[in-house]
Image (tube, grey):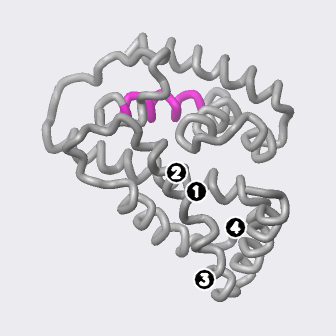
Amino acid sequence: MGNSQSSETTQLLRAWADGDQGALERLTPRVYNELRRIAGYCMQNEHPGRTIQATALVHEAYLKLIDVTNVDWQHRAHFFAISAQIMRRILLDRARRRVSLKRGGAAPKLNLDELPEIGSGRARELIALDDALTALAEVDPRKAQVIELRFFGGLSVEETAAIVKVSPDTVLRDWRMGRAWLLAELGSS
């Protein structure tokens, strides 16, 4: 998206946050394709028998987004980061429901070298990753945020740096260290 379109999107986000419902109507077509891309990224390698499609995930996330209040939208990357977080929670809730229905054993170990493939329908692995990410957030919230934005949100290093308000080099260090920490955490469970 070009700079002028990006700034127009940011202006619409801010107008929407200020209560302008017309801004939301103008914003929706601008962000829909990017939300679909994020949904696809979150769901890559999803099991063929999945219970939700990317379009349905976008629509469910959209319904949650329009209920969001008191958010000071900083820029479009901030909006997409929150959107990705909402989609992750939706998929995680679905995974937890599936696992609770099956009542299986312990969560399997997860190889973080396969991290880009984690956004799949492998419910136990997704839950194990979420538990490890929650534990990382308790130790180092910024590293957990970087992992969440880059992995679940599919954001670039630069977009992540803008949201977290650190340099791109710091994002890359946090990404590497966060992945190593998660690997160790998942290996010990």
Helix, strand or loop at mark 1: helix
Q: Amino acid at mark 3?
A: Glu
For label 4, the SS is: loop
- Give how far apart the Cα atoms at labels 3 and 1 are: 16 Å
Q: Earlier in the sequence, mark 4 or mark 3?
A: 3
Majority SS type along the magenta span: helix
Question: Residue at (74%, 24%) from the top-left corner?
Answer: 172
The amino acid at mark 4 is Val
Image x and y of residue 36, in percent? 49, 56
Q: CA distance from mark 1 to mark 2?
A: 5 Å
- Disc with the residue nearer the chain's start (3 vs 1): 3
At a point 57% along the width and 44% down the height, the residue shown is 153
The answer to whether residue 170 is left or right of residue 52 is right
Residue at x-position 63% and y-position 80%:
24
Residue 25: mark: 3
Q: CA distance from mark 4 to mark 3?
A: 18 Å
Q: The magenta stretch spans which residues?
A: 126-137
Tag 2: amino acid: Arg
The residue beneath circle 1 is: 34
Lower position in the chain sequence, tag 4 or tag 1:
1
> Judging from the image, what secondary structure is the residue with disc 2 in?
helix
- The image shows residue 25, relative to residue 105, as above or below, that is below
Where does residue 65 sit, x and y in percent of width and height?
A: 54, 68
Compared to residue 74, the image places residue 102 above or below, namely above
Magenta span has 127? yes
Nearer to us of marks 4 and 1 is 1
x 26%, y 38%: residue: 47
Q: Earlier in the sequence, mark 2 or mark 3?
A: 3
Q: Nearer the viewer, residue 107 or 61?
A: 61
The residue under label 2 is: 37
Q: Specify which label sits upstream in the sequence, 4 or 2.
A: 2
